[in-house]
Amino acid sequence: MFFASDNGAPCPPQVMDALMQANQGPAMPYGNDPATTRAVQAVRDTLEAPEAAVFFVATGTAANALALATLCPPWGAVFCHEGAHVQQDECGAPEFYSGAKLLTVAGDHGRMAPAALDAAIRGQGVRVVHSVQPGAVTLTDVTEAGTLYTPDQIAALARVAHAHGLPLHLDGARFANAVAATGASPAELTWKAGVDVLSFGGTKGGLMGAEAVVFFDPARAWEFELRRKRGGHLFSKNRYLAAQFDGWLQDGLWLALARHANAMNARLSQGLAALPGCALVHPAEANITFATLPEAAHARLKAAGARYYDMGQGRARLVTSWVTTAAEVDAFLAAAAG
Amino acid sequence: MFFASDNGAPCPPQVMDALMQANQGPAMPYGNDPATTRAVQAVRDTLEAPEAAVFFVATGTAANALALATLCPPWGAVFCHEGAHVQQDECGAPEFYSGAKLLTVAGDHGRMAPAALDAAIRGQGVRVVHSVQPGAVTLTDVTEAGTLYTPDQIAALARVAHAHGLPLHLDGARFANAVAATGASPAELTWKAGVDVLSFGGTKGGLMGAEAVVFFDPARAWEFELRRKRGGHLFSKNRYLAAQFDGWLQDGLWLALARHANAMNARLSQGLAALPGCALVHPAEANITFATLPEAAHARLKAAGARYYDMGQGRARLVTSWVTTAAEVDAFLAAAAG
Amino acid sequence: MFFASDNGAPCPPQVMDALMQANQGPAMPYGNDPATTRAVQAVRDTLEAPEAAVFFVATGTAANALALATLCPPWGAVFCHEGAHVQQDECGAPEFYSGAKLLTVAGDHGRMAPAALDAAIRGQGVRVVHSVQPGAVTLTDVTEAGTLYTPDQIAALARVAHAHGLPLHLDGARFANAVAATGASPAELTWKAGVDVLSFGGTKGGLMGAEAVVFFDPARAWEFELRRKRGGHLFSKNRYLAAQFDGWLQDGLWLALARHANAMNARLSQGLAALPGCALVHPAEANITFATLPEAAHARLKAAGARYYDMGQGRARLVTSWVTTAAEVDAFLAAAAG
Amino acid sequence: MFFASDNGAPCPPQVMDALMQANQGPAMPYGNDPATTRAVQAVRDTLEAPEAAVFFVATGTAANALALATLCPPWGAVFCHEGAHVQQDECGAPEFYSGAKLLTVAGDHGRMAPAALDAAIRGQGVRVVHSVQPGAVTLTDVTEAGTLYTPDQIAALARVAHAHGLPLHLDGARFANAVAATGASPAELTWKAGVDVLSFGGTKGGLMGAEAVVFFDPARAWEFELRRKRGGHLFSKNRYLAAQFDGWLQDGLWLALARHANAMNARLSQGLAALPGCALVHPAEANITFATLPEAAHARLKAAGARYYDMGQGRARLVTSWVTTAAEVDAFLAAAAG
């Protein structure tokens, strides 16, 4: 009964196989190797973006911080949801890399509304030299509340950002789950909706530690490369990052894994919602459930060895992954029900 | 004939096995897992340092930059050799992380002399508020020139640093090769000689991408953890960094691999030194050879498909690794000889 | 009718005289001069703080940013009111100097409540390595809303900060107005209430451009000096900063000027409150009035040449200074009344 | 006998008068005042640069650091002479503001030679992502050795910089002395020779603390304004910075003062060169003399109360200013002669 995080899941065998295949003899370092070339192409194909600049890093925090630093000047403001990972869970990495200031926008269930974003930008934009200048907008999808944006919702936010001359970044730490859950194509959720730069997360979807940063317009690719090196995020043996991604994207594996995780979450959230005294805090649209449980249920679950994030005040955060089983979900529900 | 870099080598099977073993079921993220506990202990045992604080990161640049940022304040100077990796090859990462200024010390064959270091510190130390303040000293062993320090030489530099109140960092990107070549113990080359913090390199020694940062005094461990996170270098699935290190340190594998690389380099450098028109630029004491070759030899080598770093003006940098074979060396020598 | 800002006022003749007196012959640079020694002593005497470390800079933004950088580590959070100058009006200078993240606390009329501060710190404090760590608290008095803290209110906030191990900084850009309005002594509003570091503003109180940063505990004085130099804020001819402060503090001039400004503001705010269709937005307790005026009043005032900050939606910000006259106030009120 | 620094001189009466004239009644803050408009125009007229963007700051370190931060990206290298003020005497301020790395170029008597600069840039330029990228060049005139560049020498360096696509900054902390000593026009020493940005020093030339940063191409003016604010260097009462400059530039006062300082230095250096046992270390071409004196001369000078910078090993640095008198020089020479 492991619902602590999708970061706790192991890697699927296909990814391990890809690593094994990449581990054949010497290869030129720093990305000048065939595995990197192949993985870059796989990302472009997946996103229907043949011109995109694609870079691999090992952590989601690095992907977001480096992307935002490339998009926003040091005297700029990055607008994000008040619960965003970049605001809450990266120990100031986006600010460290960019020098920028994060300004938060409220919104129900982890989503920014276009009007709220517009108001926030205007509130800042009317100021003069004394204020940080609007610099970029970043969204998260799947949101930190476990909810989703539709392509239209993303497009509406992109229109607001672009109307103010701001680029739009998408933190896709769980992008696979978002694609799987919405049924939209990767392109529809990104560049077709106006996303300029994507943090394409692999780690939470089953990789050891690999994320792709994708610039749909490659104009600032060289700057990104320098920032990545300067941040210590350029792997000498880049093939091992690339191979993970390549193995994961082959034959739709990444989406199959995400669909499974989402299905397990649906089973879990529906089961919890049906229990007396339990309630969902947010719509559980992807692979995360936020629920309120009676204290007795918490006690039973802990006694049964269930691992999850107890947020206090009766709240639990439960995350499913590609290794979550239906039996595990059912055992959790049984323990919760008592 | 691959002598371009030890960063080009694949991983030995024992390391891949360790990754496979770590890939069993869910584990708590961010280092709260058994693989990390075991690897930390393996590093401590290897260094005879039971109290040391040990942290894993994926790149050598991250290890150095984070270590120096923890040791040196933003208004400080880090003293290093003029050819040091931190000065020449990290695109300003140490300055980015620390805010400090690197001040270089000259020295033959990649080594700093104690008197030269002392003079550099004194030259800075006599200044007042207008000058950056002496903050830390960093050595590299194996040096960038492919030479070594003896434990006594390190101790002499440590005495200079400590006499000025400065901590001593050792960039051990090729620490395995240094241990193997000197016959000194890991402890003798580090804390017993006065080293305060070690970047214990694994990547050049055969790992996918894993380095350990070791604080022999754990007082600043929490600060380091925050800096690591803030830099985007904390792996959620830390077990995969740890497992690499653990597999590599078991049963002396790391030293066996390094001994092989060093032996291949000795065969190569001795062969080159004996060729007419060839000369070594630096003593080839570990796994790197710098040599001057006739242009005709360069032409023959390239025609034969040899991969190495052509530095211009007849100079070549040649690096051996755990996968270099005697046949490969002999083929290189034959092509060079013509 | 100049109510645009107290930054628009000229310098009183006593300050110009002090500059003239400091302008006699050569003096050692960088603060090693008699005028600096005298001004430092005057600040200490004013604050009844004989051991305090006192440094002069030219702008309030520099004073705040350098003070906070000395108090809060780069991975830290500075807690401030959501309307604070450091958050809204310094273009990210506190973040630039400190690397820290500002986290805001709501509160009526520009004041933080102890319970709200405590909740904000606890909300952050329960997090682990993923979150910036509580680092410092900063208050503003006179607040940006033109209101005041009593010594007891400051002490209550200091108790919260100190209970969490955080130092308390006071942005006293209008400290003179606060002292004059409360009748509390400078010591009672600062160290006696638990303030650790004070930005003692002089510019808004009548100086050309001079602020004192006061560390009641001098332990980090040398670090501050290095940060000041590194920020380009160490004046070579420091005597001219010091002389301004010295002239201003002599014979209670600074408080006499502030009392006058406060009195003019009282006349203005009371007059406005009595006008039909006008209302105060915040209690006008020092030298700033926020008021809502009918659009017709705005039109008449602008036609009459009144200078003030039109905030939109009928709101005006009006600031009085040591040169504001009763006639000017009355003319403003007459124009507003129509 | 004050030869410690030109930073020790007071302000001439014309500058104090200009401050008094600027001190009449309220004025809009942050540079939106008539004094600033007039001073900007005076700087443009002086430099024959009607389109230039002109900004005032209070210290030379701020001027240099902000200018270089605007010119050079964080992953860039700023090339400077090894003895440059930015390298030696600003406590890392240029790096703090820019994030860039300073790379030094050797050169006799404080001057860079074009070939040496070219070699330094090429040495860096051939590197790839691992190296900081060439970003900007900065010269100092008057150099830290007290020597001068001719317009042709500056033009030769500008050609090197521009051939590599790098902008050229001139640290003109003693620009007045350089103009006075060379007889070249301000335009000939700057934009006509290829200088892109000038730190136009006023403080060492007689001001309280005022420097102008001049962008001959105003394209990056807004970025500079934001950087200045973010650094805490935007004066609310900007008129007092501007008035100093305006008063100083009127009727050629600035050059008259510099000519006097230079003449006193010539008298001093020629007198010293004629003394037995004394020798000039560098040609004393402006207002600074570096000389070697017998220890007995040092002893006599100190006994006589002479103030100067004793650099050790018999060396003295002696600086003249607008208040240095011939009698003072002669008294120094007499004491030195014994």
Image (cartoon, coloured by chain):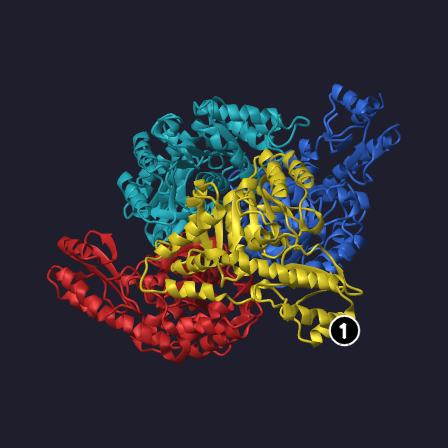
Chain colours: A blue, B cyan, C yellow, D red
Q: Which residue is mark 1?
A: C338
Residue B168 placement (x, y as % from top left): 38, 36
Residue situated in front as seen by the camera: D247 or B39: D247
In percent of width and height, residue C246 lies at 44, 57
Q: Nearer the viewer, residue D48 or B228?
A: D48
Pointer 1: residues within 10 angstroms few (<14), some, or many (20+)?
A: few
- Front residue of A220 and D103: D103
- Does any portion of residue D98 appear in the rendered image? no
Q: Where the N terminus of chain C falls, by quadrant?
A: bottom right
**Picture mark count:** 1
Amino acid carrying mark 1 in the image: Gly
Query: Quarter of the image holding residue C119?
Result: top right
Q: Secondary structure at mark 1?
A: loop
Figure quadrant of the C terminus of chain C: bottom right
Which residue is depicted at the point 84% across and 23% down?
A334
Residue A89 appears anywhere in the view: yes
Q: Chain for mark 1?
A: C
Compared across the picture, whether B148 is left or right of A105 comes to left
Q: Position of residue D109 (x, y in %)?
A: 27, 62
Q: List x then y, in percent, for residue C276.
A: 80, 65
With respect to residue A338, does A105 lie above or below? below
Specify the farthest residue to the top. Answer: A303
Q: Is residue A274 left or right of residue A40?
A: right
Observer-nearest of B253 and B76: B76
Q: Which residue is pictured at 43% across the width and 47% down the height?
A: B75
Q: Is residue D338 left or right of residue B273?
A: left
Please name the residue shown 36% across and 36% down the image: B165
